[in-house]
Image (spheres, rainbow, N blue to C red):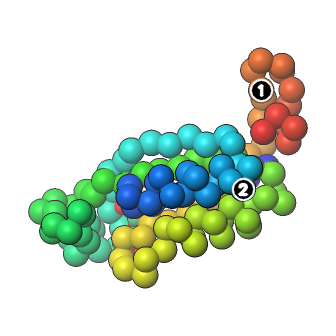
């Protein structure tokens, strides 16, 4: 099992959510966050305006998935979140050692 954490532009969330649902990815956690990358936020634009601060609104998606689904999820995220401009975001992937569905106490991949 892997955890995919993707930081994306907020205006990409709706489309990405729909694409993930269409791909049968159902378990998603979303947070509104503030962040900056290499440019420290200074040269990015938010809603067409230059934002005079260095932390820009972003959305962070967390998805825990089976190993075999990871590449498909990553390619869906890239296909929607990529504009080619600075600030498109980042995807972090890490190992998850356990998943437990609280209702049934199932563990492992079937609990995802
Ligand atoms: N190394 C990092 N660790 C944690 N969060 C990061 C990291 N890099 C980027 N982020 C998050 O991702 C958001 C978007 O990053 P961004 O796409 O600007 O990265 P970048 O490395 O500057 O790439 P680019 O040059 O394409 O802009 C940031 O606002 C921040 O929330
Ligand atoms: Mg950047």
Secondary structure found at label 2: loop
Question: In the visual, does 108 lie left or right of 19?
Answer: right
Secondary structure, mark 1, is loop
- Is 110 above or below relative to 43? above
Q: Which mark is residue 23?
A: 2
69 left or right, relative to 22: right
Position of 35 with respect to 30 (left or right) is: left
Mark-to-mark CA distance, 2 and 1 = 21 Å
The tag on residue 101 is 1
Q: Is residue 3 visible?
A: no
Compare residues 59 and 90 and report the one nearer the observer. Answer: 59
For the view shown, which residue lies furthest in the top direction? 103
Residue depicted at x 81% and y 51%: 66
Q: Nearer the viewer, residue 102 or 98?
A: 102
Q: Residue at x 58, y 47 (%)?
A: 62
Q: Position of residue 30 (x, y in %)?
A: 50, 43
Q: Toward which corner of the image does residue 85 lie, by quadrant?
A: bottom left
Q: Position of residue 52 (x, y in %)?
A: 12, 62
State which quarter of the image contains the C terminus.
top right
Residue situated furthest bottom in the rendering: 84
């Amino acid at each position: 099992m892997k955890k995919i954490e993707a930081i994306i532009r907020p205006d990409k969330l709706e489309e990405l959510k729909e694409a993930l649902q269409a791909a049968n990815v159902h378990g998603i956690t979303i947070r509104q966050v503030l962040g900056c990358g290499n440019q420290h936020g200074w040269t990015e634009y938010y809603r067409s305006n230059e934002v005079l601060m260095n932390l820009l609104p972003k959305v962070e998606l967390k998805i825990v998935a089976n190993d075999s689904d990871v590449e498909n999820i990553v390619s869906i995220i890239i296909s929607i979140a990529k504009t080619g401009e600075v600030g498109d975001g980042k995807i972090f992937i890490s190992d998850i050692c356990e998943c437990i569905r609280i209702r049934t106490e199932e563990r492992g991949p079937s609990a995802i």
